[in-house]
Image (cartoon, rainbow, N blue to C red):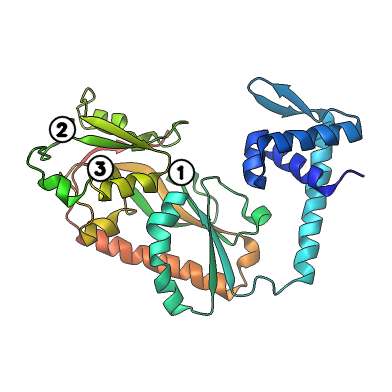
């Protein structure tokens, strides 16, 4: 019987149809997953994957094995849960994107701790959309098109895109910043979206919607994570595309300013999702109720903000 680790590597690779993504999930190297699959195929004396230049696909034998492995892993998971029912008592595990956790959720956690000091919170920041049951996560905050919101999810809030910069940059008379055309004097801070999963965060898309598709800035800086973009803007390194409400706290505190009233609204929103198994857990219910209360308070605060002019709807592709 092959070792259990080989089956775990196979299940992850089969689910993602990618050795690379399986390796990221299992926190090992891509070559380690590849070796696991090769070892499993050798021990079973059967090919489990068809390797192609543009990806993987399961063989008929691979599909048959996947069904059995998934059932076996579920059985193991349930068995562990049944003998350790109190292992997660008063612990809420939450997942969302790195940007949402860093810029919106974590700064507010102190408020939750004041209300519920007996509850521990584990933040699992991940840009992957993970399976809550499989990863043993209680609550997820998903960012997706409104029309594709998960069944049973609860909407938190939508999102608006608008330029933001540091107050010092706005006051720099050598580089005026009173209109969109003045962006030609500025360094633009880019989120390096290599797979174009969020094109509405691209300066090219925003400038096109603003009527200046050919504008050339004084320079550009690119970052692999969105929270890095915001930190660079706070540090006065250039102008960023701010995602309200993720940057509202920085605008309210004066760390960031909106140089001109011109924004765009996306067709996406943030939604709370949770597993059915958490319905009877008071600590998870308390956390979800707190999230909803935070979103209501935020909506009221946004209503009081100075309105930002709308020029276009930045739709997710």
The residue that disc 1 covers is 147
Dot 3: what SS?
loop
* Residue 110: x %, y % from top left: 41, 71
The residue nearer to you, when weighing 22 against 218, is 218
The answer for how far apart the CA atoms under marks 3 and 1 are is 37 Å
Which mark, residue 184?
Answer: none
* Residue at the image point whose x is 79% and y is 47% from the top: 5
Q: Quadrant of the N terminus?
A: top right
The residue that disc 3 covers is 237
Q: Is residue 3 above or below residue 187?
A: below
Q: Is residue 187 above or below residue 292?
A: above
* Residue 71: x %, y % from top left: 80, 50
Which mark, residue 185?
Answer: 2
Disc 2 versus disc 3: nearer the observer: 3
Crowd class of label 2 (few under 14; some 14 to 19; many from 20; radius 10 Å): some
Res. 299 image quadrant: bottom left
């Amino acid at each position: 019987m092959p070792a259990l680790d080989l089956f775990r590597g196979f299940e992850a690779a089969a689910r993602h149809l990618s050795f690379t993504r399986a390796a990221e999930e299992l926190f090992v190297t891509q070559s380690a997953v590849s070796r696991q699959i090769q070892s499993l195929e050798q021990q079973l004396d059967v090919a489990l994957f068809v390797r192609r230049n543009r990806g993987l696909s399961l063989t008929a034998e691979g599909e048959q094995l996947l069904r059995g492995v998934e059932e076996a892993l579920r059985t193991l998971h349930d068995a562990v849960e049944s003998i350790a029912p109190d292992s997660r008592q008063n612990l809420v595990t939450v997942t969302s994107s790195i940007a949402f956790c860093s810029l919106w959720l974590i700064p507010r956690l102190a408020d939750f701790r004041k209300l519920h000091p007996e509850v521990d919170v584990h933040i699992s920041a991940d840009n992957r959309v993970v399976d809550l049951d499989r990863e043993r996560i209680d609550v997820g905050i998903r960012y997706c098109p409104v029309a594709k919101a998960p069944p049973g999810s609860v909407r938190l809030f939508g999102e608006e895109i608008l330029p933001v910069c540091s107050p010092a940059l706005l006051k720099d008379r050598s580089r005026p910043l009173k209109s969109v055309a003045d962006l030609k004097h500025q360094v633009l801070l880019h989120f390096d979206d290599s797979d174009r999963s969020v094109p509405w965060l691209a300066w090219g898309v925003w400038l096109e919607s603003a009527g200046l598709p050919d504008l050339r800035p004084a320079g550009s800086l690119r970052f692999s994570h969105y929270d890095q973009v915001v930190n660079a803007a706070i540090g006065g390194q250039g102008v960023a595309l701010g995602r309200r409400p993720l940057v509202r706290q920085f605008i309210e505190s004066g760390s960031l300013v909106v140089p001109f009233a011109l924004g765009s609204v996306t067709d996406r929103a943030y939604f709370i999702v949770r597993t059915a198994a958490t319905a009877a857990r008071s600590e998870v219910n308390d956390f979800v109720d707190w999230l909803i209360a935070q979103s209501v308070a935020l909506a009221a605060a946004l209503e009081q903000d100075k309105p930002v002019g709308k020029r276009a709807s930045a739709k997710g592709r």
